[in-house]
Image (spheres, rainbow, N blue to C red):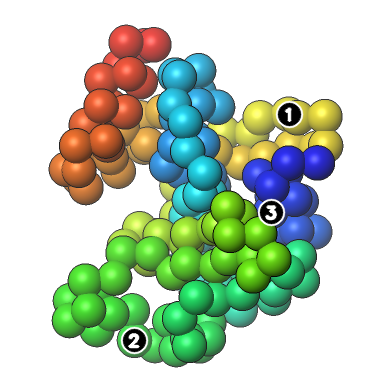
């Protein structure tokens, strides 16, 4: 089972509503894109963050920062404005290549997700339209390249 599959299975088993974003989402939609970290967007509630943190901890991923879900929920605006934090990073201390970023500047809220079936089970991905909008908003060079690649698929 790949790291992506393990993360998605843990979140699914914990009942966490999530969507894959970032490079993995771009690749899952069919554009060639290499990436190591797994970017997640969540419905922004304290319960969701707490469940996601527990699910990730349960598969050996720990927060890189000394922050808990409750802190992230309560101080999100401060982390974004004053510390320029855009993602809450989890890593595997035994495998430095296994990393997950929970994007804190995006709320999955009532947005829809696209289900993709893998051998290990279903995973949820941001739909192309929402992924393009999110990447355009970031304005980073790699994200603009991802937008171009996704638009060529449409």
Q: Residue at x 20, y 43 (%)?
A: 140
Left or right for 94, reference 131: right
In front of the other: 57 or 69: 57
Residue at mark 3: 7
SS class, disc 2: helix
Q: Position of residue 107 (x, y in %)?
A: 39, 60
* Apparent side of residue 86 relative to residue 17 in the rendered image (left or right): left
Q: CA distance from mark 3 to mark 2?
A: 25 Å
Measured in 3D between alpha carbons, the distance from the residue under mark 1 to the one under mark 3, in whole angstroms, is 15 Å
Q: In the rendered image, which quarter contains the C terminus?
A: top left
Camera-near label (3 vs 2) is: 3
Q: Residue 44: which quarter of the image?
A: bottom left
Along the viewing direction, whichever of 62 and 7 lies nearer the viewer? 62
The residue located at (48%, 88%) in the rendering is: 66
- Number of other residues with Cα within 10 Å of mark 3, as a class: few under 14, some 14 to 19, many 20 or more: many
Q: Is residue 15 above or below residue 75?
A: above
Q: Which residue is mark 2?
A: 75
Q: Quadrant of the N terminus?
A: top right
Q: Quarter-wise, where is residue 130 in the image?
A: top left
């Amino acid at each position: 089972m790949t790291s992506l599959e393990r993360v998605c299975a843990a979140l699914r088993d914990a009942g966490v509503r999530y969507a894959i974003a970032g490079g993995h989402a771009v690749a899952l939609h069919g554009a060639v894109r290499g990436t190591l970290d797994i970017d997640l967007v969540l419905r922004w509630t304290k319960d969701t963050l707490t469940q996601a943190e527990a699910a990730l901890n349960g598969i050996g991923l720990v927060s890189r920062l000394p922050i808990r879900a409750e802190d992230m929920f309560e101080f999100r605006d401060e982390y974004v404005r004053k510390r320029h934090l855009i993602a809450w990073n989890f890593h595997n201390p035994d495998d430095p290549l296994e990393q997950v970023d929970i994007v804190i500047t995006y709320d999955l809220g009532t947005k829809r997700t696209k289900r993709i079936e893998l051998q290990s089970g279903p995973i949820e991905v941001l739909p192309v339209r929402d992924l393009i909008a999110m990447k355009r908003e970031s304005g980073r060079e790699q994200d603009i390249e991802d937008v171009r690649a996704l638009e060529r698929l449409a």
